[in-house]
Image: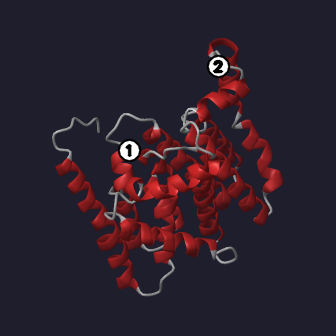
Amino acid sequence: LFSNLCIKTLKSRIVIVGTVASFVFSNIVFIAHRIVRPESLALMFCLFALFFATTYVGLLRHKHVFLLGLSLSLFSLIHPICIIFYLSFMVGWMFLLFKNRILARSLVPFILGHLPSALLVILYFRFWSIYAPVEWVGAVFGNDRIPGISVLNGFFTNIAWIYEGYMMGAKRALLVGIECVVIGWGICQLRRNQFAFFLSLITLLYFSILLLVFQPLLRPYYTLLIPAVILLMGLFVDSLRIKFPRIVFLLFIYAGYSLSGNAFLLWMNRGNEDYS
């Protein structure tokens, strides 16, 4: 699915290969699939949403925006972090539709795609949930905060925890530096590359809200950042005119470094049972 997404958005074959390799070997994706958590399922629906969004903007067929609505709505039911990503995605998606002047024609099929999930939510609160909808929101998001710590203090605490959680100490410092560069590049592409701007926008929104809402930030929560960030990296490298640095940047620096990190994690946890 991610490889098809790369084929739709990237031009150079070697960049496509390097981008797919970077995703497959990503340390965060690797960790998310070694433990029994819902982030791996959420990642699949996240890829579906990005794929249908890209396909719809290119072909403008109603079935694609319907499937986008369906994917996003089912995705939002998996885990509370998916609701955060859903809201971030919607901001970027509305911007993309508005800039391409296709907002009006897209709304009806997009809303229709949400109906199956809306029916599931209604049935859940009608027959199974012990909470009312507002109480459910408070119970779910309240359980992900440490009692007695304000939102602002929690935000700065999460910033400090990024070092251990996302950067894994200094082990991923180089990779995180590369990711910050491509996100910054994407934000600057408002006029030149709207899709790159869209990816950067939803990444920054999701990460910022995540820092405010959840505490502590578990390492699997970062999983949903990876597809957009690595695709951004592919778009950035694909925009370069010199071919050789593309190979070095993607295959040897990011993908190779990530692969060595996964090998190190396997060696350090060789005595643990995994479920991948």
Type of the residue with mark 2:
Tyr
Task: Looking at the picture, tell me which residue is in the foreground, 248 or 133.
Answer: 133
- Can see residue 52? no
For disc 1, the neighbor class at 10 Å (few under 14, some 14 to 19, many from 20) is many
Secondary structure category for the residue under label 1: helix
The residue depicted at 69 percent of the width and 25 percent of the height is 135
- Can see residue 261? yes
Instruction: Name the spot of residue 266 as percent of width and height, x first.
Output: 21, 49
Instruction: Name the spot of residue 109 as percent of width and height, x first.
Output: 75, 42
Task: Looking at the picture, tell me which residue is in the foreground, 220 or 198.
Answer: 220
Secondary structure category for the residue under label 2: helix
Instruction: Name the spot of residue 247 as percent of width and height, x first.
Output: 34, 77
Q: In this view, does 123 lie to the left or right of 180?
A: right
- For the C terminus, the image quarter is top left
Residue pointed to by mark 2 = 124
For disc 2, the neighbor class at 10 Å (few under 14, some 14 to 19, many from 20) is few
Q: Is residue 275 left or right of residue 229?
A: left
Dividing the picture into quadrants, the one containing residue 53 is bottom right
Q: Earlier in the sequence, mark 2 or mark 1?
A: 1
Type of the residue with mark 1:
Ala
The residue depicted at 32 percent of the width and 57 percent of the height is 25
Residue pointed to by mark 1 = 32
